[in-house]
Amino acid sequence: MSFQQQLELYPQAEIQHRISTTTPEQIDHALRQRRLNITDFSRLLSPDITDYQLELMAERAQRITRQRFGRTILLYTPLYLSNECFNGCKYCGFSADNHFPRKTLTLKEIEREAKILRSQGFRHMLLLTGEAPKVAGIDYLESAIKIIKKYCGSVSIEVFPMDRDGYQRMVTAGVDGLTVYQETYDPELYSQLHPYGPKSNYQYRLDAPERAGMAGLRRIGIGSLLGLGDSLSDIFYSGLHALYLARKFWRTQVSLSFPRLCPADGGFQPNRVVDDRQLTQFICAMRLLIPDAGLILSTRESAELRNNLLPLGITQMSAGSCTAPGGYGEKSPDAEQFSINDQRSPAEVEELLKSRGYEAVWKDWDGAFLNKAG
């Protein structure tokens, strides 16, 4: 069964009704389960959850995270290679509708950025581009990865969706992780928000994580952009998607992000507001649903909120981020994809983690692990 076929078993109207009509007794029942099923998960997304029930969920999420991951946080950083984009996404600063100087880093500039990030301690780098394959396509990425691999052990990509052969080329080049947000799982809203460009193909994007899994990528990260549509159903479908991927590609680590819509060029405003309490609820519920998933909280969020959410299920955090190509070396705020809230340096984040009893993990992976002796 494909994920699209599984999605069709859970119509959005039914999911919204199930979540909105959840009773306190059903929430209590879900909290008593040793392992959640997808119905239990939907109950824990109820907007009527009490403070006491949320506290119980948070305590359990913290306990599970300690059992599975210890007191460690993987630190990574985004490295933007290009802001060229052919899409008309209504919520993104890189949209082709926004007029600003476009930039694609040269190989020399890429090496400069990679050296700076390595000097800050990073060994996990996430490479990002807009969706403009004719400008920053697979050949360009292969050349960039060859340079970047000299400075870090793990390279992930958050770029345009590829076919299976494309992802296999990325694996061969040294990429071990993929991040691809569906943005929203509502196909009608998706169509409205992506009026033109390659990203307007909902189904091709939805199937991208499976193509990556079949190509052998060992990390796959997904998520929805909270604030675009109905966040309750989008979080539900994100959990459903993560479960599907974890079962189909059991050798691959599945991770989830919880990005809330940030200000960006173009002036798009969130259709829904996800407050801090609700974000906490989403993170805790996801931890209970998928105990072994990586849960990521980026610098989109404030330093205070990230500090407070740290014990409740988070396993990976970005630090010292810049969302403009070349921004680490040039220190220019121009042409950012979105605004950063947590402005702390990587060293300051590491110090915070230590003060809370956590170990900052700069490297937990190297391609050499896959080399066979002899």
Image: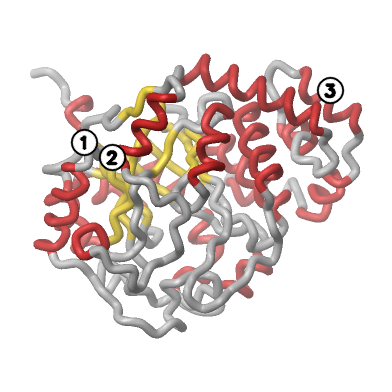
Residue drawn 36% across the image and 23% down it: 359
Upstream in the sequence, badge 1 or badge 2?
A: 2
Mark 1–mark 2 contact, CB under 8 Å?
Answer: yes
Residue 286 visible? The answer is yes
Whether residue 19 is situated above or below residue 60 in the rendered picture: below
Q: Examine the image and state in which quarter residue 318 appears.
A: top left
Upstream in the sequence, badge 3 or badge 2?
A: 3
Residue drawn 72% across the image and 49% down it: 232
The residue that disc 2 covers is 124
Residue drawn 43% across the image and 20% down it: 357
- Give x and y (percent) for residue 134: 27, 74
Q: CA distance from mark 3 to mark 2?
A: 40 Å
Mark 3–mark 2 contact, CB under 8 Å?
Answer: no
Upstream in the sequence, badge 3 or badge 1?
A: 3
The residue that disc 3 covers is 29
The residue that disc 1 covers is 153
Q: Please tell me whether mark 3 sits on a helix, a strand or a loop.
A: helix
